[in-house]
Image (spheres, grey):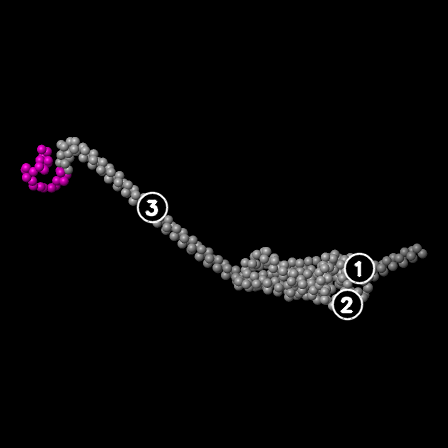
């Protein structure tokens, strides 16, 4: 009898374990879920921190006005074969756009790629409007990407590299996007920005060419300035040299004139003291001047007496 009871209890436990999954379901902390009964969404399990945003997004939504929102996770009961449970990942998802060439407001070209981090906050709206990953990618391409690209076209080239300005603009666009995404698709964007910004290859080549020309132009300018400075410096040096030489020549002439004056003074003083010596000097000078010269003089001429020494 006891053995039969044990067997019966074991069979019951096995049956319970087999059919139990048809009566319960579990929603993990990083999941959200919907429960459909006979094809109509009756319940939606959401994250507690998104309750306010979900409540705001449900205003004026007549299609889902009878849906019950539950802001806890864990174990739930369902009616087997009638209730259909769909779970979705509520962790942050990352969207990266394709590379796009844009024209800035000052007519410069840039290749930019944007990113967005988002999550599913309202699984009821999400299931009706998006449901699949491919639809989600298409949703981001058609809603998030154009807003950023259109805003980027209004910026000047330098503004793309101003982190504070870009962050302010992206925050404004994110708030604007969430008003639509939360209400129409059950998605909330947490972060958005420019993932990558590069020059197009054709632009890089033209920039390099322009830089080379600018470097050459600057080199020529510096070379011309150097030549002008050299010419000016050389002219100034030559002028100073001439001024120094002229001044030295002038001082030398003054010194020489003074020396000759003093010599003549000494010479005159000496000659005045010794007349005979003076006559001797004069006679010597006369001899020098008469070299290889023939002259005719009267025998009574005084000059002849100087030559003869009496």
Mark 1: secondary structure = strand
Circle 2 residue: 40
* Left or right position of 200 against 273: right
Indicate yes or no whether the magenta region holds residue 307.
yes
Query: Residue 76 has which mark?
Result: 1
**First reached walking from the N terminus: tag 1 or tag 2:** 2
- The residue at the point 48 percent across, 59 percent down is 210
Q: Residues within 10 Å of mark 3 (few under 14, many from 20)?
A: few
Image: magenta residue range: 286-310
Q: How packed is label 1: few (under 14 Cα within 10 Å), some, or many (20 or more)?
A: few
Which of the 4 quarters of the picture holds residue 272? top left
Where does label 3 land, which residue? 240
Say which label, 1 or 3, has the lower sequence index.
1
Mark 1–mark 3 Cα distance, whole angstroms, equals 104 Å
Compared across the picture, whether 12 is left or right of 119 comes to right
Residue at the right extreme? Answer: 1
User: Image quadrant for the C terminus?
Assistant: top left
Quadrant that contains the N terminus: bottom right
Q: Residue at x 87, y 59 (%)?
A: 12
Q: Earlier in the sequence, mark 2 or mark 3?
A: 2
Q: Is residue 158 visible?
A: yes
Residue 76: image x %, image y %?
Answer: 80, 59
Residue 258: horizontal and vertical position, in percent?
24, 38
Mark 1 or mark 3, which is nearer to you?
Answer: 3
Q: How many marks?
A: 3
Which residue is the extreme one toward the top? Answer: 273
Q: CA distance from mark 2 to mark 3?
A: 104 Å
């Amino acid at each position: 009898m006891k053995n039969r009871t044990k067997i019966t209890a074991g069979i019951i436990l096995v049956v319970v374990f087999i059919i139990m999954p048809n009566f319960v379901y579990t929603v993990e902390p990083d999941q959200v879920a919907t429960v459909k009964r006979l094809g109509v969404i009756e319940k939606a399990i959401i994250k507690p921190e998104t309750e306010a945003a979900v409540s705001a997004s449900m205003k004026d939504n007549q299609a889902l006005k009878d849906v019950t929102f539950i802001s806890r996770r864990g174990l739930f009961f369902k009616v087997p074969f009638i209730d259909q449970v769909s779970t979705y990942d509520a962790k942050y998802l990352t969207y990266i756009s394709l590379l796009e060439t844009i024209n800035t407001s000052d007519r410069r070209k840039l290749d930019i790629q944007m990113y967005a981090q988002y999550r599913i906050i309202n699984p009821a709206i999400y299931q009706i409007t998006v449901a699949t990953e491919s639809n989600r990618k298409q949703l981001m391409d058609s809603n998030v990407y154009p807003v950023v690209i259109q805003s980027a076209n209004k910026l000047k080239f330098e503004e793309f590299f101003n982190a504070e300005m870009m962050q302010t603009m992206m925050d404004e666009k994110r708030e604007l996007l969430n008003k639509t995404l939360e209400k129409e698709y059950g998605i909330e964007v947490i972060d958005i920005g420019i993932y990558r910004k590069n020059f197009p290859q054709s632009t890089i080549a033209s920039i390099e060419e322009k830089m080379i020309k600018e470097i050459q132009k600057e080199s020529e300018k510096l070379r011309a300035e150097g030549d002008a400075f050299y010419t000016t410096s050389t002219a100034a040096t030559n002028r100073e040299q001439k001024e120094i030489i002229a001044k030295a020549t002038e001082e030398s002439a003054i010194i020489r004139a003074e020396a000759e004056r003093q010599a003549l003074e000494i010479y005159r003083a000496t000659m005045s003291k010794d007349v005979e010596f003076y006559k001797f000097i004069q006679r010597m000078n006369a001899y020098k001047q008469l070299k290889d010269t023939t002259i005719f003089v009267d025998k009574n001429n005084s000059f002849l007496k100087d030559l003869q020494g009496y």
